[in-house]
Amino acid sequence: MIKGLYEVHLPVSNISASVEFYQKLGLQLKEEDDEVAFLWIIPQRSQLGLWKHEMTSQREPGSYPPNGRHLAFEVDFDDIEKAEAWLKERGISVAQHGKMPPIEPYARPHSRNASVYFNDPDGNNLEFICNLPDGPMEPARLIYLSEYRSL
C-alpha cells in the first residue's frame, strides 16, 4: 500500500526564517502565509509543511496536529478507497480530520490530493495521501472523495 513519503509537518518559531533555511537546502516554495508554509521536496511528489508554533488565526479544527507531528505516506489513487479497510484489517482505526466524520476518504481538489487519517499509539497524526487524477480544482475546501467524483 505505501509507496513512499508524501509529506512531513514540523512546528517552527519563525515561518520566514524556516522557509529561507529549507530553500538553502534546495526545497522549492509552494505556498506561504504568516502561519504556514509548504515547500516541495520533490515537485508534485513530496513536501514539507512548516507551521508557526503559536498560530494566531482559527484554522479548521484538525488541520494541524495538536502535538505538531504529522507524517503522510504516499499511496496510489487506486488504493485510497481501500485504505480504511486495509487499516481495519490491521486493527487500526481511521481518524477524523476537521469537522467531517471519517466516513470515506477526504479530497482537496485545490491541492490535487485525497487522504485518509489515522494515529499511531503515541497520538502522532498519520495519513495516507494520493494525488488526484486530472479534474476540477474547485472547490477550495475539504470534501469527500465521492463529492469530488461527482464534480
Image: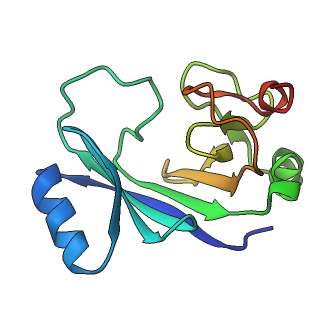
Side (left or right) of 79 relative to 135 = right
Image coordinates of residue 20 in percent, x first then y, are 15, 66
Image quadrant holding the N terminus, namely: bottom right
Residue 106 in the image: x percent, y percent?
Answer: 70, 35
Q: How far from the left and from the top, in percent, is residue 6?
A: 57, 64
- Display colour scheme: rainbow
> Looking at the image, which residue is at 56% across and 26% down?
141
**70, above or below 98, in the image:** below
Task: Identify the residue at horizontal 54%, vertical 25% (top origin).
Answer: 98
* Quarter-of-image position of residue 22: bottom left
- Closer to us: 148 or 80: 148
Question: Which image quarter holds the C terminus?
Answer: top right
Q: Looking at the picture, tell me which residue is in the foreground, 26 or 120.
A: 26
Q: Is residue 119 left or right of residue 133?
A: left
User: Based on the displayed image, in which of its 4 quarters is residue 97 positioned?
Assistant: top right
Query: Where 42 sits versus 77, above or below?
Result: below
Residue shown at 70%/55% (left/top)? 130
Identify whether 24 is placed above or below 92.
below
Image quadrant of residue 145?
top right
Place of residue 37 in the rendered image (x, y in percent of width and height, measured from the top left): 30, 50
Total numbered labels placed on residues in the image: 0
The extreme bottom residue here reads 25
With 69 as the anchor, is 86 left or right in this view? Answer: right
Q: Residue at x 42, y 41 (%)?
A: 65
